[in-house]
Image (spheres, helix red, strand yellow):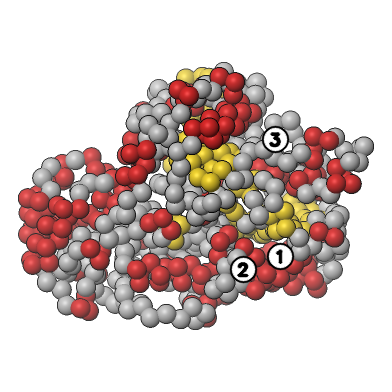
């Protein structure tokens, strides 16, 4: 038996034709759906990138115990388990987070791996002189942004793109090993993750009239751009999506050419989605995990069940099911710590479920799926209702990281943090090993308290636009949530942070939160101030703060209209962003004061139509 997994990053389910999209160009996803089971109720679990990949390896949720980090010493790794079972495993990827401090233990679990450089801010090419990008609407311009523009100068053709090279290597593996048996190859690209950088032939699929500055990399914040700028970014994403579709088609072509469908499991998946202006937001992480982010596409071809080709499955499945699925395909046992189950069991036909050799419990549908990010809402869905439980109070405490690998995305825990660490008792999945319990520091205005507890009925409100107050349903969903916390051996601190009891039978009216947090939730849904709401000069509310404050007259205007702002902690949140983005993230400054400041800046720094909305120091060109 053989297995191929094609994994994308930030692939939006609702923009794929098999899930109803009618304007994107993705014929190979349509072709894929004709050969696979299309899962209609697949949910992510732990977010974002590396927490999702930890689930991919371990078959269990991890966001309740720690944030972004490597595999832990006590973690079971699916590719490593396959290798021990006699299955050769190979990874080809351009996902740069594997080679950072917070992901350094994942790729070494495979028998072999190949990596292709240049995605996002991958520290790839060395350039001492700063790049000179075109005028750009992105406000967050740190080292990752700088490095990305360095990298782009080396990716001037599609053949050099990391995605192209990744699929080239995956196809090489298929060609060289097509006659062998017992192998698994994971072809994983960072695309269509932002920045939405691609070449002209894909952009040409989405012609539109856009005369503004370069914009293919939204900040992680509320939408403050104009409608034409929002539409432009959606087309930039769609262009990269179409390139991904082309790469997928190359894999399908190889499976056809080499006759691999009869004995090869194929999984096509993603870690999460990306908000492209829906609900007034860009990206992920900061806001609640709405369905655009967590209701993910999943396609599976199981050669043992060819009759399922072209079918759809409605039952709840999750990322944690992928590791058990691969182990089951090769006859390798899953570990007791895994909470996922093989997808073959989820889609078992009635006669298969009644097979006396198959335990009846394995054919039962999943009652609920839990998902979230460390320190954020803890969410649960039964497939119809989605319940997003915020913290019980504004402090979002107590909250601890439980780890023996104290690193984050691009760095290590500081000595100051570790000075407060203490050994915690083992969890059920740590194999008798104690972990370091490290207090987690969170900014209250970036935590779940800002958005409140939310409940949505997907049957009547599939776009999640109208949160409900329904005490009976909330009580039922809290019980499901508590059951999931228990099943995942959540730390005691999570129960306390969320304000829920430790047993479902103890759930009572005093644990309801929706009504108590209704006003907070309503305020969080208000539309953010946007660029179209204010007059704009050459220096304006969208000018990055360091540049704006470099103008003495502008700095003086800020001090008069927004007294105390320059001395507040708010600037640590978006120090490289703009005042408009600062207001979008924190709610400060308010709209009235922004309007007064905008009028004065427009008077002090008048702009022509050609430079409207473009920071003065960056009027070097446009797309």
Whether label 1 touches label 2, CB < 8 Å: yes
Nearest to N terminus: mark 1 or mark 3: 1
Q: Residue under circle 3?
A: 338
Please tell me which residue is depicted at 22% across the width and 46% down the height of the picture.
588
Crowd tier of the residue under label 1, counting other residues whose Cα lies within 10 Å: few below 14, some 14–19, many 20 or above: many
| Image spot of residue 144 (x, y percent) | 39, 56
Q: Residue under circle 1?
A: 33
Where residue 447 sits, quadrant-wise, is top left
Frontmost of labels 2 and 3 is 2
Q: How far is the residue under mark 2 from the one under mark 3?
A: 33 Å
Q: How far is the residue under mark 1 from the one under mark 3?
A: 28 Å
Callout 3: helix, strand or loop?
loop
Q: Which mark is residue 69?
A: none
* Nearest the eye: 165 or 576: 576
Residue at the far right: name it.
Answer: 356
Please tell me which residue is depicted at 57% across the width and 32% down the height of the picture.
476
Crowd tier of the residue under label 3, counting other residues whose Cα lies within 10 Å: few below 14, some 14–19, many 20 or above: many
Q: How many marks?
A: 3
Residue 398 visible to the viewer: yes
């Amino acid at each position: 038996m053989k297995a191929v997994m094609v994994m994308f990053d930030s692939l939006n389910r609702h923009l794929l034709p098999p899930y109803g999209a009618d304007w994107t160009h993705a014929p190979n996803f349509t072709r894929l759906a004709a050969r696979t089971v299309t899962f209609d109720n697949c949910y992510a679990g732990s977010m974002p990138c590396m927490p999702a990949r930890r689930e991919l390896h371990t078959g269990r949720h991890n966001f309740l115990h720690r944030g972004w980090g490597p595999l832990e010493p006590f973690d079971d790794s699916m590719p490593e388990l396959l290798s021990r079972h006699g299955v050769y495993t190979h990874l080809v990827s351009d996902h740069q987070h594997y080679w950072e401090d917070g992901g350094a233990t994942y790729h070494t679990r495979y028998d072999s791996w190949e990596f292709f450089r240049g995605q996002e801010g991958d520290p790839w090419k060395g350039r001492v002189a700063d790049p000179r990008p075109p005028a750009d609407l992105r406000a967050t311009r740190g080292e990752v942004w700088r490095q990305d523009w360095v990298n782009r100068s080396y990716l001037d053709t599609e053949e050099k793109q990391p995605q192209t090279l990744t699929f080239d290597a995956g196809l090489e593996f298929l060609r060289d090993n097509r006659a062998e048996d017992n192998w698994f190859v994971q072809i994983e690209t960072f695309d269509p993750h932002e920045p939405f950088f691609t070449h002209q032939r894909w952009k040409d699929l989405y012609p539109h009239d856009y005369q503004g500055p370069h914009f293919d990399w939204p900040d992680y914040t509320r939408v403050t751009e104009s409608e034409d700028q929002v539409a432009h970014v959606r087309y930039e994403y769609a262009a990269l999506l179409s390139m991904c579709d082309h790469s997928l088609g190359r894999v399908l072509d190889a499976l056809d050419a080499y006759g691999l469908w009869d004995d090869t499991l194929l999984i096509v998946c993603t870690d999460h989605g990306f908000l492209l202006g829906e609900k007034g937001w860009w990206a992920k992480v900061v806001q609640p995990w709405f369905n655009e982010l967590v209701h993910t596409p999943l396609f599976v071809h199981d050669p043992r069940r060819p009759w399922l080709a072209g079918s759809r499955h409605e039952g709840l499945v999750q990322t944690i099911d992928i590791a058990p699925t691969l182990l089951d395909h090769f006859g390798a046992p899953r570990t007791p710590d895994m909470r996922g189950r093989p997808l073959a069991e989820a889609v078992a036909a009635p006669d298969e479920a009644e097979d006396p050799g198959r335990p009846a419990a394995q054919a039962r549908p999943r009652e609920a799926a839990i998902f979230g990010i460390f320190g954020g809402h803890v969410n649960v869905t039964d497939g119809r209702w989605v319940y997003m439980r915020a913290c019980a109070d504004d402090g979002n405490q107590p909250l601890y990281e439980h780890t023996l690998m104290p690193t984050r995305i691009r760095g290590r825990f500081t000595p100051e943090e570790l000075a407060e660490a203490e050994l915690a008792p083992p969890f059920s999945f740590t194999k008798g090993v104690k972990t370091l319990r490290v207090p987690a520091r969170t900014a209250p205005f970036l935590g779940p308290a800002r958005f409140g507890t939310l409940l949505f009925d997907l049957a009547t409100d599939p776009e999640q636009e109208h949160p409900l107050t329904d005490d009976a349903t909330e009580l039922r969903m809290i019980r499901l949530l508590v059951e999931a916390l228990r099943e995942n051996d959540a730390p005691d601190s999570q129960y306390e942070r969320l304000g829920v009891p430790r047993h479902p039978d103890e759930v009572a009216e005093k644990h309801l939160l929706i009504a108590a947090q209704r006003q907070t939730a309503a305020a969080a849904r208000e539309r953010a101030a946007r660029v179209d709401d204010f007059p704009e000069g050459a220096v304006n509310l969208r000018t990055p703060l360091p540049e704006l404050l470099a103008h003495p007259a502008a700095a003086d205007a800020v001090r008069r209209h927004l007294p105390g702002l320059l001395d507040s902690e708010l600037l640590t949140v978006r120090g490289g962003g703009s005042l408009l983005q600062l207001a979008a993230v924190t709610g400060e400054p308010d709209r009235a004061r922004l309007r007064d400041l905008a009028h004065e800046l427009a008077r002090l720094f008048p702009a022509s139509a050609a430079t409207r909305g473009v920071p003065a120091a960056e009027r070097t060109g446009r797309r």
